[in-house]
Amino acid sequence: MGGEQMQSLRRRKIAKYLKLLVPAGVIAGFLLVALFPHWFARYSYSQMHPSRRLEGPSADFWFGTDAFGRDTYTRVIVGTRISNGIAAGAVAVAVIGGVWVGVAGGLSRTFGFLLMRLVDVVICFPPIIVAIFFMAMASPGVVTLTLVIGFLYAPRMARIVQGAVLEVAQAAHVEAQRALGAGILRIVRTGILPQILAPVVVQATIMLATAMLLEAGLSFLGLGIPPPTPTWGQLVSDARRTLHLSLYLLFFPGLALSANVIFINLLGDSLRDFLDPKMRRSG
Amino acid sequence: MLRYTLRRLLIAVCLIAAVGIIGQLAIHMIPGDPAYIILGSETTPDPKVLETLRRDLGLDRPITVQVLAALWGFARLDLGTSLQDGRPVWKLVEASVPVSAVLVVSATAFAILFGMLFGMVAAVRHNSGVDWGATVFATLGLSVPVFVTGTFLIYLFAIYLEWIPASGYVALSEKPVDFLKRLILPTVTVGLAQGAEIARMTRSCMLETLRADYITTARSKGVAEPLVLFRHALRNAIIPVAAMIGVQFGSMFGRTVLVEALFGWPGLMSAMVVAARFHDFPVVRGILVMIAAIFILINLITDLAYAVLDPRIAYD
C-alpha cells in the first residue's frame, strides 16, 4: 500500500477510536456525577433562597434558581443520579431477565417459536403506555420504577439474545462441544454466552438511552419518582409553570437529559461498529 | 386471501382478549394491596372503607370470575366505571378518542411530508451542508425528548413571539381558526420527531436507489432530473419507508401521551395519565384495553394492506 493510503487508513482508525472514547468519556463523567453528587452539588436540593427566586445564572447559582429559590444546578446534579441509576438498574433487570429467556428460546425449537411470535407482538406496543398502567397500581418509588421499566424491556432483550443464540448454535465450536459430549449447561456457559456478549452489550447500551427517556417521560407526567426528589423529567415539567419568567429552568435540565441520551446513543453506535460490524446499518 | 383475513382477524381478537385478561390480572401481580394504594398511603384508611372498595372493584371474587366478568364486559363495550366520578369509562373513551385521532393523523401527515422531503433533499445533496444538517437533525430527533422540544416550542411561539396560544384544545366545530392555531404546535412537536426517523430512512433508501443502473440509464436518456427523482427513484425508495411508518405507530402513540399532557389536550392518552395519577384503576385498565385494541386493529389493517399489495404474503 502507498504512503497516502496508509495515512488515510490510520486517520480512519483514529477517528474510529475517538468515536468510541469521546462518548465513553462523557458518559463516565455523567456516571461520576451520578455516583458522587455531593462532590458537585453546591447546596441542598431542597434548600430555598426566597429572596433570589427565578434568577438567571450567576456566580452564586450557576444555572439560576427556580420559583422557590432553589439552586437549579444542584437539582440537575441530583437528578443525574436518579436518571442514570434507574436507567442502569432497569437495563440490568432487562438483561438478566432477557438473556435467560432468550437463551432458552434459542435452544428449544417449540419454546423458541412461541416466544418469537409472542415477543414480536409485545415489542411493537409503546412501553410508556404499559408503564403508565403499572404505575397506576403501584406506589411510586425507585425500586418499583426500575422493575417496571426493566420488565418492559426484557422482551426486547430476549428477542435479540434469541436471534444471536440461534446464530451461534450453528457454529462449528458448538458442534465440536456437542460431539465431545459436553453437557448443555457447559455449552451455554463456555460456547454460547461469550459469543452473544457483543450484541447484548450493544443492545444494553441502546436500551440505556430509551430507559432514561422513559423514566424522564414518566416523571414529566407525574408518575415517576415523586417530589421532593428532583428528577430531570420533573424539572422540565415544573419549568412549564414559570416558562414566561425563566427559560433557564427548561434549558438546563433539558440540556442535561438530551446530552446524556445523545452521548449514550453515540456510544452505542460506535460500540456496534467496534464489536459487531455485521450489524452496521446503512445511513 | 379470505382465509388469511379470517386467520388474522381471529388472532387479533385473541390478542385483544389477552390484553383484557392481563389487564385484570395485573392488579394482583403488583405487590401491595390495590385498595390501599388507591385510597392513598398517607393516612391509614378505615378497614371498612377498604373492604367496600375491594368489593366495588370486584377484587373479592375468585380470579377466574374476575377475568371472565371483565372479558364479558369488554365484549359488551362495558369498560368499567370510573372510581372518581362514577361515569362509565366508555363515555370517557368516546369523548377523547376523536381528539387523539386528530393529533395522530395530523402529526403523521406532517412527519411524512417533512421527513420525506428532507430525506430526499439530503440524499440528492449528498455530503453537503444539508446532508450533514439532516444527520444531526435525525440524531437530535431521536435523543431530545419530545416534551423538551415541545416546551421549547411553546416558549418560542407562544411566549416569545406570541403567535399562537400555548395550550388547550378547542373543537373544530366550535372555533375552526382557533382549532387550527392550537393544532400547529402539538403536530409539529410529534411530527418533527417522527419526521427525523423518516428523513433518515428516506435518505439512505434514496442514496441506494440513486446508485442503481436504471437511474443512470434514465439520466443518459436525457430524462429531466426532477422526473428521475420523483418518478423513478422515489417510487422504489417509498416501499421501505411505508413499512417503517407502519412500525412507527407504536412510538407515535408513546409520543402522543407526552404531547397531549404537555399541551393539555383532552385525548385518550392524557385521560389515562390523569386517571393513573389518581390510581383510578378501572379507567386505566379500560383505556389500556382500548388502546391495545386500536393498535392491534391498525396492525391488522396494515398487514392486510401489505397482503393486497404483495399477494405472496397471503400464502404464508
Image (spheres, coloured by chain):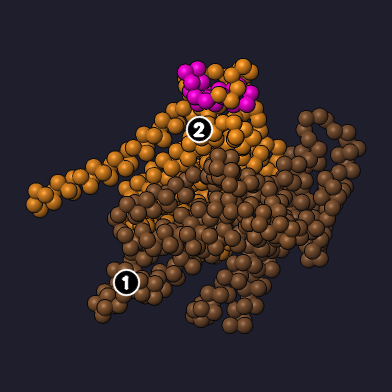
Chain colours: A orange, B brown
Query: Label 1, on which residue?
Result: B225
* Spot occupied by residue A110 in the image (x, y as percentages of width and height): 54, 65
Magenta region: which residues? A56-74
Q: Decide which of A205, A47 is in the foreground and name it.
A: A47
* Spot occupied by residue B280 in the image (x, y as percentages of width and height): 77, 46
Q: Decide which of A109, B131 is in the foreground and name it.
A: B131
Q: Badge 2 local density, few (<14 within 10 Å), some, or many (20+)?
A: some
Residue plotted at (13% across, 48% down): A6
Helix, strand or loop for disc 1: helix
The rendered magenta stretch, by its main secondary structure, is classed as: loop
Which amino acid type is shown beneath numbered disc 1? Glu
Is residue A279 found left or right of A53 in the rendered image? left
Q: Decide which of B36, B249 is in the foreground and name it.
A: B249
- The answer to whether the residues at label 1 and label 2 have Cβ atoms under 8 Å apart is no
Is residue B128 found left or right of B84 in the rendered image? left
Is residue B285 found left or right of B186 in the rendered image? right
Is residue A256 found left or right of B44 in the rendered image? left
